[in-house]
Image (cartoon, rainbow, N blue to C red):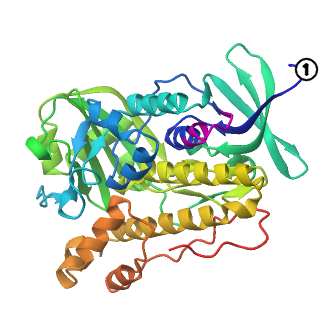
Amino acid sequence: MPSSPESYDVVIIGGGPAGACAGAILGEYGHRVLIVEREKFPRYHIGESLIPFTFQPLERIGMIPKMKQSAFQKKYSVTFVSPDGKRSQPFYFFNRYDRETVAQTWQVLRSEFDQMMLDNAREKGAQVREETTVNRTLTEGDRVVGVEVTDKSGRTYEIHAKMTLDCSGKEAFTSNRNGWRLKDPYLNKIAVWTYYKDSKRGEGIDEGDTTVCYVPDKGWFWHIPQHRGMTSVGVVAEGKYLTRGGVREPKDIFHREVEENLWLKDRLSIGEPCGEYWITSEYSRHSRYCAAPGLVLVGDAFAFLDPVFSSGVMLALKSGQFVGETVHEGLVAGDLSPARFAEYGAKMRAGVENMRKLVYAFYDPNFSFREVIKRYPEAGGEITDCLSGDVNKDFTPLWNKIREFVPLPDDLPYGEPLGAEAPAPAAR
């Protein structure tokens, strides 16, 4: 152990999109910030489809020129396919947003995208330490004052900081250890996925569209074309449905479900699966608190929703930007009290709840986007805004329309800072 701990303004647990975004902003402002990442980048990660409103945080940290110069597959639309193989018209983002900015996004390979993001944080002034595992947070009284880590050589040491950001992703490091992590009452699916090389895809502007293909019992496939001829394909549904008949092997589950959608079966009739078959479960999780003295939770460590509408990276970037700016203001003001993060927690929870309502509606067997828009044509634009990631609007009129078709969940009472003097007001 060193005789004296290292000291920073901010230490960030995790170098994924949330941590890299917050780190880039804080580094750009000149703060001493250290990102501690357990793995060595580039590393594999699922979650490849960026929705339109990732544009704003990517623009804020200077990533848009790099994205435009990359080989990533451009994405302009989303398409839905019924089990009988009937494909909807593509929902083009440029019918509602500026074609040169928000309306054009990307399908990314996360190993490459996350490496670009972490390198960008370095360029902005953040220090990065990879292959370094956080063992525990350090506390003085009720305040988090840093972390204890172990590096790849086996050396264990302390890092002290005025603020610790938990950007640990699905692991939800502090939420798990503090007993704050809560399952969603309903949204607990499992997913099985793999990758195809040189399978069928659209042409021209439709080459990179995300396709959501329904399977029975409100399960669905994602079909995400990537660069270099690769395509990410996965199925999400209730575990009891996917494992019916005693089928347990991910490969067997995947190929059986492909047979349930004619459009997808045709797409995968050429090309070859490559790599392993992955499986994960319990998608939707929430943290009871967004922050505590000396600590704030960001991205998936704060909340993660079922991935049907590809909201994960957008919420990670949005929260990383929000927290980066808020911590900067707190460092300048000399005030990093939990109450400073009340607006952050309320705004991010409001965005999560808006997207969560659409996810609940999607899984209801009595729900159809088509029927809602048929009765209320103006709902099409409102649905597009929410699905595109413009989640902090007042969607009350839309929810009133959808409730005529299916019930929607109440907001979960989570997200305020622990130790703040008063709960945060709802941010819409």
Residue that badge 1 annotates: 3
x then y, percent, for residue 241: 37, 55
Q: Residue at x 73, y 45 (%)?
A: 163
Identify which residue, 259 or 85, lies in the foreground. 85
x then y, percent, for residue 327: 66, 50
Quarter of the rendering containing residue 202: top left
Q: Residue at x 45, y 68 (%)?
A: 392
Q: Residue at x 21, y 77 (%)?
A: 373
On-image quarter of the N terminus: top right
**Mark 1 belongs to which amino acid?**
Ser
x then y, percent, for residue 184: 55, 62
Instruction: Tell me if I can see residue 106 in this picture.
Output: yes
Left or right: residue 300 versus residue 66 is right
Up the image or down, 381 lies above or below 109; here it is below
Identify which residue, 282 or 232, lies in the foreground. 232
Residue 27 is covered by the magenta coloring: yes
x then y, percent, for residue 246: 39, 45
- The residue sitting at the left extreme is 203
Q: Residue at x 23, y 73 (%)?
A: 380
Left or right: residue 149 versus residue 194 is right
- In the image, the segment drawn in magenta is 25-33
Pointer 1 local density, CA inside 10 Å: few below 14, some 14–19, many at least 20: few
Residue 149 is covered by the magenta coloring: no
Up the image or down, 392 lies above or below 8; here it is below
Count of numbered labels shown in the rendering: 1
Identify which residue, 52 or 281, lies in the foreground. 52
In the structure shown, which secondary structural element does the residue marked by tag 1 occupy?
Answer: loop
Left or right: residue 102 versus residue 87 is right
Instruction: Tell me if I can see residue 137 in this picture.
Output: no
Left or right: residue 117 versus residue 415 is left
